[in-house]
């Protein structure tokens, strides 16, 4: 049997899309320019250094971060005088594993372990890319439950070429869109599984996926 498996046309389409995304992300090199996070993306992310490095959800730690990183750390003053982040923390839950790896590797690799040096940008770019590629493979798996190999390949190409997936996984990979793409496919797969076998674990993970989708948007 081919290394691509039985459904090799759709597998090849998914591999080509994954390769194009990977090449574009690292060819652009936004992580080298500290541009993986910008504007809203910082607001999704800032929860992680706020909780795990600075213990300051009021975002008052902005003055402690070296200006050379250009980090955007701000919050919205409330009527009681407290400062609250504008964005919800849903995206930060999905960023968390890659933030954790970056934080563990920062000092051993010679980077500042402040949440905003180059290693954090690199790991976040990698994380967003892996979520997108995983989402595409899961979408392929789900579509093959109903459709043939070639129609699924065409559908994957249409999603890649006809939607904003390419832009939001390369130029603005850490906006909410790519994470929602991944979670939406996970939600649909869990719903399909629960409809076939209404097990408690499927209901639990459906609730988790639905809750994260709601928390993000």
Image (spheres, rainbow, N blue to C red):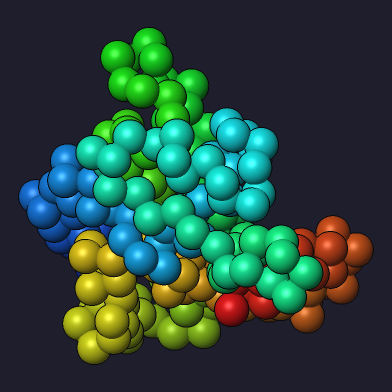
Left or right: residue 163 compared with residue 30: right
Image x and y of residue 135, in percent: 44, 64
Left or right: residue 101 compared with residue 57: left
Picture quadrant of residue 41: bottom left
Q: Nearer the viewer, residue 212 or 190?
A: 212
Whether residue 210 is visible here, answered yes or no, is no
Q: Nearer the viewer, residue 85 or 206?
A: 85
Left or right: residue 178 compared with residue 11: right
Q: Which of 115 and 178 is in front in this view?
A: 115
Picture quadrant of residue 66: top left
Image x and y of residue 97, in percent: 54, 40
Whether residue 179 is visible here, answered yes or no, is yes
Q: Is residue 97 above or below residue 139?
A: above
Q: Nearer the viewer, residue 42 or 158?
A: 42
Picture quadrant of residue 193: bottom right
View extreme (top): residue: 108
Q: Is residue 108 above or below residue 93?
A: above
Residue appearing at x 67%, y 77% in the figure: 214
Q: Is residue 158 above or below residue 63?
A: below
Image x and y of residue 14, in percent: 28, 64
Left or right: residue 28 compared with residue 199: left
Image x and y of residue 57, in percent: 65, 49
């Amino acid at each position: 049997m081919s290394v691509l498996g039985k459904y090799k046309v759709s597998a090849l389409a998914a591999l080509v899309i994954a390769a194009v995304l990977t090449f574009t992300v690292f060819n652009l090199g936004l992580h080298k320019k500290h541009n993986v996070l910008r504007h809203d993306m910082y607001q999704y992310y800032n929860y992680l250094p706020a909780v795990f490095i600075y213990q300051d959800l009021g975002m008052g730690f902005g003055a402690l971060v070296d200006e050379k990183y250009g980090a955007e750390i701000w919050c919205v003053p409330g009527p009681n005088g407290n400062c609250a982040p504008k964005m919800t923390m849903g995206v930060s839950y999905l960023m968390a594993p890659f933030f954790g790896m970056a934080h563990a590797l920062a000092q051993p690799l010679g980077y500042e372990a402040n949440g905003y040096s180059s290693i954090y940008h690199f790991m976040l770019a990698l994380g967003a890319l892996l979520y997108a590629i995983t989402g595409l493979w899961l979408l392929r798996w789900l579509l093959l439950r109903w459709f043939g190999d070639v129609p699924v390949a065409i559908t994957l190409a249409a999603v890649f070429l006809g939607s904003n997936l390419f832009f939001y996984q390369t130029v603005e990979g850490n906006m909410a869109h790519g994470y929602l793409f991944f979670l939406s496919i996970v939600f649909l797969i869990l719903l399909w599984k629960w409809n076939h076998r209404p097990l408690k674990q499927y209901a639990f993970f459906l609730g988790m996926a639905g809750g994260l989708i709601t928390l993000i948007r």
